[in-house]
Each structure stands twice: as structure tokens, then as C-alpha cells.
Amino acid sequence: MKSIIRGSAVTLAALPLWLSAHTMNLLPSHFVQAKTGSFVSVELFASNTTFQADKGTPVDGFQLYLPDGSVGKVQGSYQGKRKSLVDVALPVDGTYRLQNGGQPRFFTSYELNGEKKRLMGDKQKAAAELPKGASNVVTTQGRNKALAFVTVNAPTDTVLKPSGQGLEFTLDKHPADIVAGEAVTVTVLFDGKPASGVDSELMFDGELYRNEAGRQHFKTDAKGQFSFTPQSAGRYLLEAALEKDLKSAKADKIREGFTWAFEASMP
Amino acid sequence: MKKIAVLVFAGALSSSVATSAQAAQLQIDVAIPQVTEGEAHWPYVAVWIETEQEQPVRLVEIWRQKPDWLKDLRRFWRKIGRSDKALVDARTGATKGPGEYRLVWNGQDNQGVDVAPGKYVLVVEAARENGGRNMVKQAFDWNGSAVNFSIAAGSELGEIKARRVD
């Protein structure tokens, strides 16, 4: 979550977006389609206010998974200043997974003469590049991804299945079946196992036009679960992140996060 | 318009032939209101029966132009439209202008089997291009006793009247 980042984000301008206080967004033009062979246009951006595009994110991290789980081709893309765009063809019925990011990156934070600093790189790189006198050295393996699911005609489940790697989630219903007023239970997984104590935040579209952001905060229980009920039909963003110690030659800590854009349909 | 009225009539006729003469029906009168402001597209409308547990029982009729926009009948799409194209195609008619239209539920499910006596729900959903969406529901007992109710008009649907005819 943002709060995890905020304390140490001292050189924001120099950091890639996935490390900044911004939230990664992947927002398709449509979540539901009634026609095979149609398209959706997908916006990729970083935001603070929910779904208000602040900065276009790179399009080369975008991945499309077809309903059978195979990787699809992007039809066209544009990297914009405020938002980036990719066009995606939907040639068959079923549920598609759209994802941006997901590649692990390493950064090392340290203190020098009382000032907090970072360098991009794992423990080996840090060992070679750290200035003399650096203290409080911590290397983090970070991985963030932004997700959405688009369904053409009847929903399918193949692309919903967790891979067993990193921070993921499952639902007690299909994303295309989320309806205003009906509860949704989320199970957060880390490396395929339910993860307890994970912080998450649920955001509802339209924050720019109301006083109360109305964000809801959750912490997963012993089963890795939490539940929420979308009160209104509309577009939502769920963000979750986890940070834990890591015993590895490359990093001391791991930080994983995802955002998932979805819509709650009218009853 | 005329063509559709004939088709609906023929459908009602053939089902009354196929089933016994005493088979009860639910007559459903759906009114499409006159739109006086903005673009006057005719609404997409779906009429169906659900169980109290919100499971679809019988699609009575669906009026549409292009199938691409059926998804905008959000409940219809989720409950029926997205997963049973053949059924939807079989019950599809053209969109209709302002007026009153009589539909009939023959007391059967989508497989053509008489439903068990019990409580059912009439659902009518309408969505209009450059207009709004209405979805109304009314539960009723389907156990041989009289059924007679009406649902107040909304922006996209006029008053709906339903009654059992034995």
C-alpha cells in the first residue's frame, strides 16, 4: 500500500513508477462484451485519485491472456504522457486476463551521512556500487502488477487460476458476476498459499467529484480472506500489498503488490 | 411492427395447441412509453421468469436490434443472455415503439416442462440507447390461485400488468 512506500520514498522523481507513491492502473474500456471479434481499448496509467490518470505507464509490460490461457497479441499501443493505451482483440468467447507489470525488480535503500538514498539493483550490484560509509542497507525485491478481466459472452475460469507465484488472489465468484449489493470474498495468496495479515484498499470511481474518498481498508484473516459488498454499481479498484523478509542471495526483503480494476454491475 | 405482432400471436397459438386447452397462462402487458426528449430510440426489452432464488426459469421474450448491445440489459445478460445464445435467438423479436404489448408465459420452463407450483418472479428489464435503464420485478404465487398485479411505470417502461388466465 501507499503507506508502506511513503516513509522511504525520498527521491521520487528518480524512481520508476512502480516504486513511487502512485497506484498502477489498468482500465479496460469494457469489462463485458456481447460480440466476438470486437476490441477493447485499455488505459495504462499511474494515479493518486482513483482512475484519474496522472502519468502514462510503459506499454511494453502489458500482457494479454486469451480465455484458453495462451498469450495474445496486442493490436496497437501508444505511450502517452498522462495515459497509455493498448488495443486488444477479443477473437473468441470467454474471459481474458489483462495484466501490466509483474516483472521482479530490485532496489537497495541505504543511509549516507544521515540522508536516505536508493540505488536500483540487487545485493550483488549494491555490494559493488554502494558508497563507503553506507549504513542501514536493505535490498528489496519488488513486483507490482495491474490487472483486469474482460468477458465476452459466457464467462470462463482458465485465466482466473493462480499461478502459485507471488501475490495473487481468487474470488468466491466470477468477476463478471460482481453485482452491487452482493458480497464478494477475496482470498489473497502468496506463492499459492493463503496469506494472512495482508493490507488491501478498495476504491470507488468518482473520487474527484466528492468530498469523502470513502476508501475501505481490509486486512486478510487467518484464511487469507476478507469480504466486501460494493454498495453502488460502477468501477472499483482493489489494491493489495505484502512485505516480508526474504532469505536470498539477491534481496533481504520482498514486496509484492497488485491492483485489480473491476466493475460491479447493476442488480 | 405488424409482422412481429403476427409472430407473437402465432407463437401463442402453437403453444396452446401443444399443451392442454386448460393450461394456465400468465398474460403480461408491457407498455412502452412515448419518449419526448432527446433521441427517441426504441428500447431493448427482456421479459423473463425467475425463481425466488433468482435463477432464470423461462425467457418469455427479448426485443432488440443488434445483439452487440444485449449486454446493456445488465441483469438479463448475466442471468441468461451471455450463456444461452440459442435460447435468446429463439425468443428474439424486433424493438417496439410506444404502445402496449401482450406477452404470455405458458407456465413452463425453458425446457418446455410445466413448472412446479410455488413462488415465481416476473422480471422486466429495458435499456435504451442514449437513454436510461429500468429493471422491475414482482413475485407472485403460481399455484392455481388468481394472479393479478401491476407494476408502476418508470422512465423506460410504462405500466406492466399481469394476470393469470386459466
Image (cartoon, coloured by chain):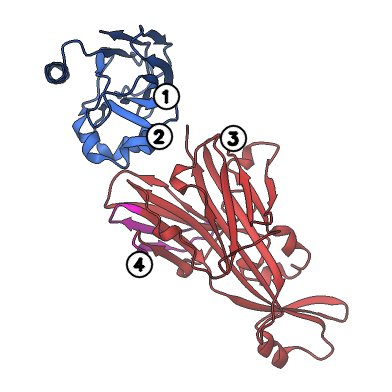
**Label 2: how many Cα within 10 Å (few below 14, some 14–19, many 20+):** many
Residue A63 vs A206, above or below: the answer is below
Q: Amino acid at mark 1?
A: Met
Drawing shade for chain A: red
Q: CA distance from mark 4 to mark 3?
A: 35 Å
**Chain drawn blue in the picture:** B
Q: Are marks 1 and 3 in contact (CB under 8 Å)?
A: no
Image location (x, y in percent) of residue B4: 16, 20
Residue A51 visible within the image: no
- Chain to which mark 2 belongs: B
Q: Nearer the viewer, residue A42 or A245?
A: A245
What residue did someone put label 2 on? Answer: B74
In this rendering, do the residues under marks 4 and 3 share a single chain?
yes
| Callout 3 secondary element | loop
Q: Nearer the viewer, residue A250 or A173?
A: A173
Mark number displayed over residue B20: none
Residue drawn at (38%, 18%) of the image = B37
Closer to us: B157 or B147: B147
- Residue A46 x/y as whole percent: 58, 58
Residue range in magenta is A68-94
Residue B65 in percent (x, y) is at 24, 31
Apparent side of residue B65 relative to residue A39 in the rendered image (left or right): left
Q: Is residue B11 magenta?
A: no
Q: Which residue is mark 3?
A: A231
Q: Amino acid at mark 3?
A: Gln
> Which residue does the numbered mark 4 point to in the structure image?
A70
Type of amino acid under label 4: Ser
Residue A66, visible in the rendered structure: yes
Question: Which residue is label 1 attached to?
Answer: B135
- C-alpha distance separating marks 2 and 1: 9 Å
Please tell me in which quadrant of the rendered image residue B132 appears.
Answer: top left
